Image: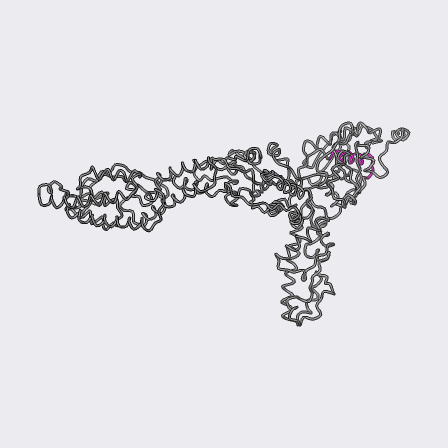
């Protein structure tokens, strides 16, 4: 029932890490409760003051005895303080108090500072007599001194900061905190000292070291209850973990790199050549800056996997950053530390993850970056991907420069149309086109089929997929530039075979039911020579008697269903007014049908198929050129007039109406389609064409020739009409594809029409023109 009367000086509240209050009070005296008057809403009691220090000064004996006790107490107190670091402000203030305060007040002050249990502090509080209080406090001081001496002996000698480890901080001590919390405070302080040591021994730049030392000084003076304490500590730990000068050594053996690239990926010669060039230059110049490459191609051709293969070839760490849908520049540059929940950007986080400063960074789907109110991440990438600037990349969270010049950045994109021009200018574009049928067959048998067999627990002794079957899958069940759909179809075949293998093992356990299953073998054609002669051998018990299962066209139809794609080119060109064009999409090249019809009307041109403005203008160009050359080619409308729009409406339709179409390359196709309609002649069924037209009848070059040619090859077309100025683009096409196709180079529309129709589209003599008018 003894307590301390005090005046409240300050009340501080905080909600982090949990709601709590800190109360700063000034003690007045001890008191004893005589009577409790009320308890609610707060206790009120009648008390009696117990501290009557003036009564001791009137007794001579007590004064002498207290003088000896106070001198002894003062001596131990000074000895304790001198064992601490006097450079700490709290220790210097305590030494000043020992010399200036009355001796009678020292036991209470020292007891609140030294390490004691709550029970011992309550005993000192209950000691009303000053003599008793001195006698109880002196042993506590001696115990603290001995503990400090023992601690100094057991610990290795360090710098002057050693005393700071055991420094007593009276301004942070609250009486009701248990001893475990005090231990945690000392451990935290040890961690701060270790953190400072790591900062000083790290190889960070001079500017970063200066910033870190400034922050560590602030951290030492900061109470742990402040929210900024954790933020500052996390920042310093990140700075220590970043690889400022740590790097991996490149493997520069070009022959080994060539073999590794060829084993991992089939085709892609241009891309492999660029990687080997980089290795060769690195052999001659060690401090070469990392190039900024951008692989552009349709999905499924291996852009991401080849980036991983490049890192493996160089012997570097690999880190992938997915940029699809990113619409905040803070994802690239990080947040400023003033924000709650701030964190570094993906570049710095990636460097922290890999632990070296020269990894291979794959910036996946760079063409799908967004833009929002939080900024433009594509603009933030300008600094990252500029070799002249990224040696001093400044993340908002770090706020110091970091060198990215040794990082090999590889970006991937499906198209360059959505990449800002400034960002596109900083990257070296490497086109990764779609695969030919022969390349897909090789990729399937080298990589895809072994991978699917391993994933489904099958072996080559259980399933055989011939190259003819693979070609059927490519032509009839997939139509893509890459190999993702092909991989999924092969997975479906392996799953169906896995069911048969599991059922076959069950049949082996019951031989009497094996014959009844013969009628169900219509889905597999079994190779007779591969059948085991007997199943009595223990080595063959794991294999059913039908092994290996041979996948042919009939098995494909049962497993994958009817073919999804058929060669319908010749059937769709069975009447005039239909022509085949070639289009480029981000998914690869595609063939595109153009259909036209005419009917009585008012001379209107109707365009359908969700066309863009450029394609609509190409249609108007085509009809204008045909009207101006109608007499020369004997083109008339239904009434026999050379004015093709006289009382005639024309409807042009581009099938697949749900797909947006635009671009100038359909000009020659529209002209051919309309010429077929007005002349009544059929376009050759094996001809496809592409090219931009002008009002004078010239054929201008277009882009995406390789993808368009591969699309025509996949569709089984044999003759392709392209602009003469695109002849140079044919060098990128594989030799076997060029041998299967016939290319017609056209510089004007007359040449296009002559090549598109059997027997040509020659100008008819004037006599026939007069007879046609009659």
Q: Is residue 681 magenta?
A: yes
Magenta segment's dominant SS is helix
- Residue 641: x and y in percent read 83, 29
Give the colour scheme of this rendering: one colour
Q: Nearer the viewer, residue 662 or 156?
A: 156
Q: Is residue 240 magenta?
A: no
Q: Is residue 3 left or right of residue 715?
A: left
Q: Nearer the viewer, residue 198 or 657?
A: 198
- Residue 463: x and y in percent read 68, 60
Q: Is residue 34 visible?
A: no
Q: Nearer the viewer, residue 214 or 24?
A: 214
Q: Nearer the viewer, residue 101 or 682?
A: 101
Q: Quadrant of residue 552?
A: bottom right
Q: Is residue 765 left or right of residue 439?
A: right
Q: Is residue 633 visible?
A: yes
- Residue 50: x and y in percent read 14, 44
From the viewer's perspective, is residue 618 above or below residue 732? above
- Residue 7: x and y in percent read 22, 38
Where is the C terminus found, in terms of image quarters?
A: top right
The magenta stretch is 666-682
Count of marks overlaid on the render: 0
């Amino acid at each position: 029932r003894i307590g301390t009367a005090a005046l409240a000086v300050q009340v501080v509240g905080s909600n982090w890490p949990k709601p709590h209050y800190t109360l700063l009070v000034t003690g007045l005296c001890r008191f004893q409760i005589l009577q409790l008057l009320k308890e609610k809403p707060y206790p009120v009691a009648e008390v009696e003051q117990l501290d009557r220090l003036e009564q001791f000064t009137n007794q001579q004996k007590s004064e002498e005895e207290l003088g000896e006790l106070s001198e002894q107490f003062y001596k131990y107190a000074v000895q304790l303080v001198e064992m601490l670091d006097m450079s700490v402000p709290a220790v210097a203030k305590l030494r000043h108090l020992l010399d200036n305060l009355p001796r009678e007040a020292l036991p209470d002050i020292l007891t609140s500072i030294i390490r004691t249990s709550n029970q011992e502090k309550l005993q000192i509080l209950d000691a009303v007599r000053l003599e008793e209080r001195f006698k109880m406090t002196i042993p506590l001081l001696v115990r603290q001194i001995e503990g400090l001496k023992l601690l100094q002996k057991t610990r290795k000698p360090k710098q002057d900061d050693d005393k700071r480890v055991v420094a007593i901080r009276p301004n942070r001590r609250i009486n009701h905190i248990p001893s475990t919390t005090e231990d945690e405070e000392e451990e935290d302080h040890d961690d701060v000292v270790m953190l400072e040591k790591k900062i000083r021994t790290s190889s960070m730049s001079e500017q970063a070291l200066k910033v870190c030392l400034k922050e560590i000084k602030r951290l030492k003076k900061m109470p742990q209850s402040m929210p900024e304490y954790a933020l500052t500590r996390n920042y310093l730990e990140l700075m220590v973990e970043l690889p400022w000068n740590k790097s991996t050594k490149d493997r520069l053996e070009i022959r080994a790199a060539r073999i590794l690239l060829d084993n991992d990926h089939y085709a892609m010669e241009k891309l492999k050549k660029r990687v080997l060039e980089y290795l060769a230059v690195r052999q001659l110049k060690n401090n070469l800056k990392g190039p900024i490459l951008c692989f552009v191609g349709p999905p499924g051709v291996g852009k991401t996997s080849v980036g991983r293969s490049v890192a493996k070839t160089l012997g570097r760490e690999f880190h992938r950053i997915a940029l699809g849908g990113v619409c905040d520049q803070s994802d690239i540059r990080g947040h400023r530390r003033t924000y709650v929940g701030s964190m570094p950007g993906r570049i710095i986080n990636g460097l922290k993850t890999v632990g070296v400063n020269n990894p291979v960074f794959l910036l996946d789907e760079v063409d799908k970056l967004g833009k929002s109110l939080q900024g433009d991440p594509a603009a933030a990438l300008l600094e990252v991907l500029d070799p002249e600037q990224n040696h001093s990349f400044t993340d908002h969270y770090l706020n110091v420069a970091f060198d990215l010049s040794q990082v090999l950045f590889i970006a991937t994109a499906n198209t360059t149309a959505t990449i800002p021009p400034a960002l596109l200018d900083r990257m070296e574009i490497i086109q990764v086109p779609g695969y030919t049928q022969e390349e897909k067959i090789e990729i399937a048998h080298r990589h895809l089929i072994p991978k699917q067999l391993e994933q489904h627990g099958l072996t080559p002794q259980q399933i055989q997929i011939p190259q003819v079957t693979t070609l059927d899958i490519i032509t009839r069940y997939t139509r893509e530039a890459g190999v993702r759909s092909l991989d999924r179809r092969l997975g479906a075949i392996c799953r169906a075979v896995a069911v048969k293998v599991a059922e076959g093992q069950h049949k082996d356990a019951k031989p009497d039911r094996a014959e009844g299953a013969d009628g169900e073998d219509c889905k597999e054609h079994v190779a007779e020579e591969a059948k085991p002669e007997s199943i009595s051998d223990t080595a063959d018990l794991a294999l059913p008697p039908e092994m290996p299962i041979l996948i042919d066209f009939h098995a494909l139809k049962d497993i994958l269903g009817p073919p999804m794609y058929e060669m319908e080119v010749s059937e769709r060109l069975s009447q005039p007014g239909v022509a085949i064009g070639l289009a480029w999409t981000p998914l690869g090249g595609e063939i595109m049908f153009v259909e036209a019809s005419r009917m009585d009307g008012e001379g209107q041109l109707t365009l359908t198929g969700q066309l863009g403005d450029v394609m609509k203008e190409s249609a108007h160009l085509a009809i204008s050129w045909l009207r101006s050359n109608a007499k020369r080619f004997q083109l008339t409308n239904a009434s026999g007039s050379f004015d093709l729009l006289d009382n005639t409406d024309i409807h042009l339709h581009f099938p697949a109406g749900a797909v947006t179409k635009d671009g100038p390359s359909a000009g020659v196709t529209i002209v051919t389609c309309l010429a077929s309609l007005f002349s009544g002649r059929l376009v050759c069924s094996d001809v496809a064409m592409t090219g931009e037209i002008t009002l004078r009848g010239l054929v201008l070059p277009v882009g995406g020739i390789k993808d368009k040619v591969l699309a025509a090859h996949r569709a089984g077309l044999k003759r392709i009409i392209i602009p003469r100025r695109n002849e140079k683009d044919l060098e990128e096409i594989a030799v076997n594809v060029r041998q299967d196709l016939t290319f017609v180079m056209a510089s004007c529309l007359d040449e296009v029409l002559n090549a598109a129709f059997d027997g040509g589209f020659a100008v008819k003599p004037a006599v026939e023109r007069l007879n046609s008018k009659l």
